[in-house]
Image (tube, rainbow, N blue to C red):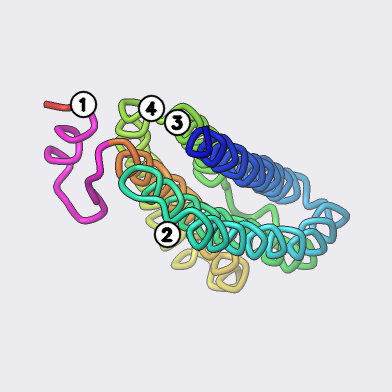
C-alpha cells in the first residue's frame, strides 16, 4: 500500500508538470500565430502584445524546471520516468526559444512597418514557411502528449520543407538587393524573420526527437535520418 500511494503521488506530480508544459506549448503557438499575423498585416498592436507576453513564457519555463528538480529529488525516478522528466525540461527550453523567435519576428515587423519600402518584396515563402512552422510545432506537442514516435519521425521529415522555403527566399532576396540596393535594409529585416521562422521549425523538431528519446531510450539528436527512423519505428 505505501508503495502504491507513493506511485499515485508521483503520477499526480508528473501530470501536473505536464499540464504546465502543454499550457506553455499552447501559449507559444499563439505567439507564433500572432507574429505571423502581425507580419502579414503590419499590425503594431499585435507586435506590442507579443513582446509584452514574453515574460509569461519565461516564468512558466522556470516553474516547470523547478518542479522537475523537486520531483527528481523527492522520488528519485529511474529509466523511462527519469527520461520523461529530462525531456520535459528540454521541451520547455525549446518552447521558450521558439517564443523568443516569435518575438524576433515581431520586433523586425515593427521596423518593416516603419519603412516605406515594406511592399517592395514578395514574402510568399515567409508566409508559407510560417504556416509550416506553426503546423509542425502543434504536431510536435501532440506527438509528445501521445508519445507517438511515428508522428515524431514524420515531423523531422517535414521540417526539410521549411528549410527549402528559407533557401528559396534567400535566393530571391539576393536578386531583389542586386536590382534595388535601396531596399537592402528592409530585405535584411525579412531575412532575419525568415531565419527566425526556420528556427521555430528546428525547435519543433527538437521536441519530436525528445519523444523518441522518452519512448525508445535513444538519443537521436545527431544520428542519420535512416537510423532515426529505425529507432522511431522499432525496426
Disc 4 and disc 3 in contact, CB within 8 angstroms: yes
Q: Give the range drawn in magenta.
A: 216-233
Nearer the N terminus, badge 4 or badge 3?
3
Q: Name the residue under label 4.
A: 148
| Disc 3 to disc 1, C-alpha distance | 14 Å
Q: In this view, does 66 lie to the left or right of 211?
A: right
| Disc 1 to disc 4, C-alpha distance | 10 Å
Nearer the N terminus, badge 1 or badge 4?
4
Nearer the N terminus, badge 2 or badge 4?
4
| Disc 2 to disc 3, C-alpha distance | 39 Å
In the foreground, 33 or 19: 19
Q: Is residue 121 above or below residue 55?
A: above
Residue name at image x 63 percent, y 60 percent? 61
Judged from the image, the secondary structure of the residue bearing numbered disc 4 is: loop
Label placed on residue 175: 2
| Disc 4 to disc 3, C-alpha distance | 5 Å
Horizontal and vertical percent position of residue 142: 51, 30
Horizontal and vertical percent position of residue 58: 68, 64
Q: Mark 1 points at which residue?
A: 233
Horizontal and vertical percent position of residue 88: 49, 50
Mark whose residue sits in front, 2 or 1: 1
Amino acid at each position: 500500500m505505501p508503495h502504491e500511494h507513493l506511485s499515485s503521488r508521483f503520477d499526480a506530480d508528473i501530470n501536473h508538470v505536464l499540464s504546465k508544459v502543454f499550457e506553455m506549448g499552447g501559449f507559444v503557438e499563439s505567439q507564433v500565430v500572432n507574429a505571423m499575423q502581425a507580419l502579414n498585416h503590419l499590425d503594431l498592436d499585435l507586435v506590442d502584445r507579443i513582446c509584452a507576453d514574453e515574460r509569461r513564457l519565461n516564468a512558466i519555463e522556470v516553474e516547470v524546471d523547478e518542479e522537475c528538480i523537486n520531483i527528481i529529488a523527492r522520488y528519485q525516478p529511474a529509466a523511462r520516468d527519469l527520461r520523461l522528466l529530462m525531456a520535459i525540461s528540454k521541451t520547455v527550453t525549446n518552447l521558450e526559444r521558439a517564443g523568443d523567435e516569435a518575438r524576433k519576428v515581431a520586433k523586425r515587423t515593427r521596423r518593416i512597418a516603419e519603412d516605406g519600402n515594406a511592399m517592395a518584396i514578395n514574402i510568399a515563402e515567409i508566409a508559407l514557411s510560417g504556416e509550416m512552422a506553426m503546423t509542425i510545432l502543434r504536431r510536435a506537442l501532440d506527438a509528445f502528449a501521445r508519445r507517438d514516435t511515428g508522428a515524431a519521425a514524420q515531423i523531422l521529415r517535414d521540417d526539410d520543407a521549411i528549410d527549402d522555403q528559407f533557401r528559396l527566399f534567400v535566393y530571391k532576396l539576393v536578386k531583389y538587393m542586386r536590382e534595388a540596393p535601396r531596399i537592402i535594409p528592409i530585405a535584411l529585416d525579412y531575412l532575419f524573420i525568415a531565419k527566425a521562422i526556420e528556427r521555430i521549425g528546428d525547435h519543433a523538431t527538437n521536441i519530436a526527437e525528445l519523444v523518441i528519446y522518452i519512448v525508445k531510450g535513444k538519443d537521436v539528436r545527431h544520428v542519420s535520418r535512416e537510423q532515426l527512423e529505425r529507432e522511431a519505428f522499432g525496426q
